[in-house]
Every structure is written in structure tokens, then in C-alpha cells.
Image (cartoon, helix red, strand yellow):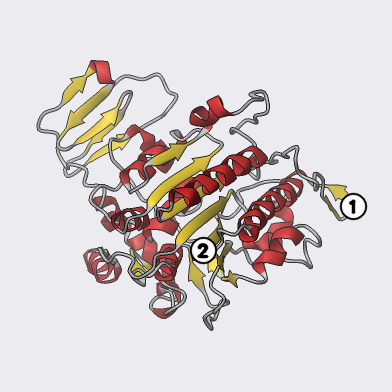
Amino acid sequence: MNGDTGYFSKYYYQTNKKSSGHKKNIIYIYGESLERTFFNKNMFPGLTDELSAIKDKSYDFNNTIQLLGTDYTIAGIVASQCGLPLFAPFSGNSSDSLSSFFPGTIFLGNILKSSGYDLSFIQGADLDFGGKRLFFSNHGFEHLSGREELAHSITDKSYINNWGWYDDTIFDIAYEKYLKLVDNKKTFGLFLLAVDTHHPDGFISRNCEKKSYHYQWVYNSSMSAVSCSQEQIAHFIKRIVASPSFKNKIIVVSSDHLAMNNTASFALNQLPRRNLFMVIDSDSIRKDVKTDKFRNTFDNGATVLDLLGGDTKLGLGRSSLQSDSLLFDFFPDMISKVNSWKKSVIELWGFPKVIEKFTIIQNAGKIEFGDTSFKLPALFKINKHSVDPFFDRDAEMQIIV
């Protein structure tokens, strides 16, 4: 493990380099479980026609694999913006119980903010679930909108699914936000998460024309949700590209992670599973890029930085415009290598290894020790050389110290 820690330090790259020159605006769309595998036209004929037409004219990095610690939404976002797996001494979806998210580390949002970007994140789901509010607010994003924050601007409050507002609602709100950002004439980053494709069945927005997809003559709920959601994403992109303001911009569309077990899994598992990462660049001059080389989602943030005039490395990620991924270049068995770095990644959280004293602040509902605070309720396992927190967002339990 000590040797692997040394290797981690060698390849983990922190950068303070700002974007230079005439900075481009960025619109970044995460599609929940919208993996690249769904775009196989032989397996899924007609499923993604609208977005495929755009993808085929973009930088389509079609060989993006999924590594450990990147296989659920907040973990996939961390991988794409930090070049790191979401390893922590607790369940990653419980990170909303913390006071900080990977404190002291420099991620994509931090670099863009220091470069003068005005950063926003919009989704239809609860921002606190999975710690997305904490993550984005800790790393450069000033404007965050989720289920609760958007409620005042939505007329039909009954039009909501189990996760939040439907994708068509979110993309309408996002387009209005885009127009305001353009009018403000500040360099901006607008990041979105579409969630209608959430497992196990997905949801169908009422504005979709493609509400139903039959696989081998049988209706499939997950594929229907994919067909509908990709149509909404494509429509949103077309509105932006068709506007006079589409200059000096890039649009990124990526999956947050591979689809979890859903009603399409039996078909997906017949193919090599790959994540989606495509980039539409408003520049008419395209670089000659090999887009089918092996890469992973750690490389997404570095590639975006490169496109925006910044560095070409971020965390464990490398720009796919400039070089090979660590996955390809250094470690044929990157999966076991990443797992061996788990201890090094956890140390980036900066958790104290002992509790010399602690304070419970009842009116704030939190406990503090060292330089860290945790929301209550929480459970701590005290080992000889570490303090490991455990959280359950919904459990009724008492602090044990």
C-alpha cells in the first residue's frame, strides 16, 4: 500500500492554471444513466436518433469505461469534474451530512471560478441527496437550483415524479437561464442533470413526441425513458445552436454513470458497456482527435479544461485531445490500480484520526471535532488510528462516541 501511495502522488495532478485567452462559455448536460451503449443502432434501432444526429457531428469519445468509485450519480460527477473516484470512509450518498466535500482540493469548478466563470447547476431532484449541494457550493458554483428551489417558478406543481421535476420542465428553465446568462455578458458555465432515465423504469415527460419504445416488439419502460429524455436533450441543444448567441461555446453531454439494473439491462449486457461523453464546439475548426481510444470518466474534466484554454491534466484525468488516458498509457489493469489508491483518496477528505475533544451544537444539529463538523444523527467508529463516520439520512439514531 505504501508503494501505491507513492504512485498516487506521482500521477494525481492538482492544477491552479486558469483558463487563458478568449474564454469559452460551457453548457454541460449530465444524462442520468444515459450510457453510450444505448446509441448502438443495431441493438437499439431508432432509440436515440435525435441525439445521435448531433453526436455524429461532435467529438464523440466512444470508448469511455467506468472505474471503481464512479458508478452512481454524485460519484460520476466527482469523477468527471475532479478526476477522482468517490472513495470515502462512509457511503458516498451520505456526504450531505458533512460540512465540506473534499476540502482543500482543486477541481474543475474551482479552476473555472478563479478564471472568472459564473457557475450554475440545475436539476429537478433534491440537491441535498448525495451531497450535490455541498459538492457544488464547495467547488466554485454560486447558483444552485433543485427540487425545492425551482418550486416557486413552476405553475403546475402536480407535474412531478418520484425524483423531482420532469426533464422537459428542467430544460425549459435551463434555456431561460441560458438566455439570461448570455445577456449578462459574463463568462459562464451552466451545468444540468436530467433524471427522467433513473432506474428501474424511468419517467416520460409529457412534451416528448417519443413516449414509447418497443424492443423486439415488446414495450420497454427504461428504453422508452431513454428515447424521451434524449429527445429533450437534443431539442435543448438545437435551441442553443440555432440562437445567434451560439459563438465561443462548447456543449458537453455525458452520462453520470452506466445504467444501474433496469428493464434494459438484459440488452445492455450483451454489448461492451461504455459511458457517454460528447462535445459540441462552436468553433468551425475541429482538431484531428482519435475519439475511439480507451479512456475513462476521470479524463472528462481534463478534456473540458483543455477545450476551455486551461490545463491538460486534472486529478487522475488527462485530456483526450492531447494524450492517452492513464487507463491506456500506464496501467493496463487500471481497475486494481485505482482500488489500491483508496487510502490515498480518502486522506484527501482531511478527517481527523483521533477525537481529542468534541462539541455538540444542538441548535445547528451538528457535532464538531478537529476542523470538521458533521450533521446529526451520526455514528462514529473509533479505531486505533482513525475515526470512521457512518451516516443514514433517514435513520433515527443517537450519536455514539
Question: Which residue is at 58% across, 46% downward?
Answer: 175
The residue wearing badge 2 is 250
Relative horizontal placement of residue 272, taking residue 46 as reference (left or right): left
**Numbered tag placed on residue 217 in the rendering:** 1
Q: Earlier in the sequence, mark 2 or mark 1?
A: 1
Q: Separation of disc 2 and disc 1 at Cα?
A: 38 Å
Confirm whether residue 29 shows in the render: yes
Relative horizontal placement of residue 35, taking residue 53 as reference (left or right): left
Question: Which residue is at 63% across, 24% downward?
Answer: 157
Question: Which residue is at 36% across, 57% downward?
Answer: 108
Q: Quadrant of the N terminus?
A: bottom left
Name the amino acid, label 1. Trp
Name the amino acid, label 2. Ile
Q: Residue furthest left?
A: 356
Q: Which residue lies furthest to the right in this view?
A: 217
Of 166 and 378, nearer the camera is 166
